[in-house]
Image: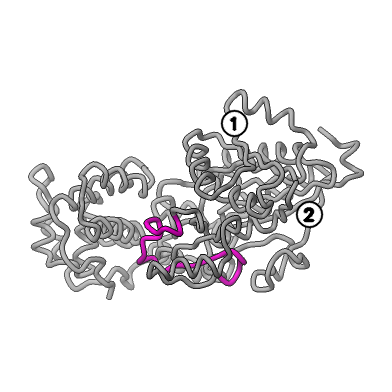
Amino acid sequence: MEKSVKKRPLGPMAREALKRALAATIEQGAPSDRAITEELNRVHLEDKAERQAIRTHLTAILFSRARLAWWLKRLKIEESPACLFAAHAIITRAAPPSDVIRDWFSSEEPSPPSALAALQGENLENAGQDDLTRLECPKAYAEGLKRAFGPRFAEEMMAMRASAPPHFRVNTLKTTREGAVKALRAEDIAVRLGRLSPWSLIGSGEEDIAATAAFKNGLIEAQDEASQIAALVVDAKPGEKILDLCAGAGGKALALAAAMENKGLLIACDVSEGRLRRARQRAARAGVSNITYRLLDTQGRKWLKRQDGRFDAVILDAPCTGTGAWRRNPDARWSRQDGDLASLTARQDQLLASARRALKPGGRLIYVTCSFLREENEDRIAALLAAHPDLKQEDFRISPLIPDAIRPKAGPDLRLTPAQHGTDGFFISRLRRDSVTSQTQNM
């Protein structure tokens, strides 16, 4: 039996906020975190427990959307945000069917489907469901994920049916991991040490870390442990020149700046001014002073073309399908389909070419995606190596940069997965530009 996600029913204002956020996510393709934040800001709910309950409800529905849709189809009920919520509430025993139908469907809604009452006593899973439905796997991605996981396909998909615990990176510019743990314990926050990254802490998900002094004072940052490993293998050193080509909101740039001890030059680039604004805010809180930010607008792209052979290292966390981050973004598995793949792989190739040009002879290139798909990962590295013989791939099977717990058994690349490592799904490849060949291959 699925457990109820709420001990008491949501109030009218909370139900309306959840309903609107669910509609924005499902019908408009809005990211769920943004949709719920906008709705919470709109309704001005003061009850913290109710605010958290709205987030919990929305996340639970998104993690079980395929199975809920299967039940609605079986009962000949058209899928809608209201019906998805009602079906989930009835199946998880959150409230009696009569209360759910009475409270959830407003006067503006079509008549509540009486067939919903038939869900009482049922479970989310049913023997009649096909494997993709049971595993919450979009058909568009099924073949690519089976190719990536092989016999571990079902195990990995099951690991992505629930939220990931919060991961944090200790900011070594301000404290040690032991110091961060002590500071959090002083605020009655219990965390455990991550086993893969030397900087990582893992929470339970019940605590409000953002409200702690440790977070506000920049001692810790939210960052998945796999993302920390991606920054770790850059092997950034004080005094180097490093380019973060797709910096986003700056999580890896902060980790690199700490490894560089605020010495040297770190340039963080992104196409989004909003993401770079958040990156600057995070850097200020973290006490980081060696990052320069570049918006890759028309002028920024011209600047990038002039950076040939300038950097000791380039990290490229490329735009991708995000299949590895479904535990944190459950809406993404349904909002993107494989029609995006061709344009994404073309963009990845372009960015890899730019990253390679920016490297000094002897410089290192770290390619990262939060995708499981080989088309975005191994296939892109193979194409890059074929086009640029001055690049040599390094082998993580013998690398001293990573712990034995994640050392790959086959192939030079590093793959991290929820089921195997307890992290988001990440692909990491490290290459080096040959210092001899590059003299004659520079393009």
Identify which residue is drawn at 47% across, 51% down.
Answer: 140
Q: How many marks?
A: 2
Could you tell whether 112 is left or right of 242 in the image?
Answer: left
The amino acid pointed to by label 2 is Gln
Relative image position of residue 76 (x, y in whole percent): 21, 56
* Applied colour scheme: one colour
Q: CA separation, marks 1 and 2?
A: 28 Å
**How dense is the environment of label 2, judged by Cα within 10 Å: few (below 14), some, or many (20 and up)?**
some
Element type at mark 2: strand
Name the one closer to the observer, 115 or 161.
161
Identify which residue is drawn at 55% across, 70% down.
Answer: 178
Which image quadrant for residue 383? top right
Element type at mark 1: loop
User: Badge 2 is on which residue?
Assistant: 393
Label 1 or label 2, whichever comes before in sequence order = 1
Residue numbers of the magenta segment:
194-215
Q: Quadrant of the N terminus?
A: bottom left
Could you tell whether 437 is left or right of 322 in the image?
Answer: right
Residue ranking furthest to the bottom: 1
Relative image position of residue 334 (x, y in whole percent): 40, 50
- Position above or below: 49 against 35: below
**How dense is the environment of label 1, judged by Cα within 10 Å: few (below 14), some, or many (20 and up)?**
some
> What mark, if any, has residue 63 been given in the picture?
none
Could you tell whether 110 is left or right of 352 in the image?
Answer: left
The amino acid pointed to by label 1 is Leu
> What mark, if any, has residue 296 been given in the picture?
1
Q: Quadrant of the C terminus?
A: top right
Relative image position of residue 22 (x, y in whole percent): 28, 49
Relative image position of residue 418 (x, y in whole percent): 52, 66
Evaluate whether residue 344 shows in this view.
Answer: yes
Q: Are marks 1 and 2 in contact (CB under 8 Å)?
A: no
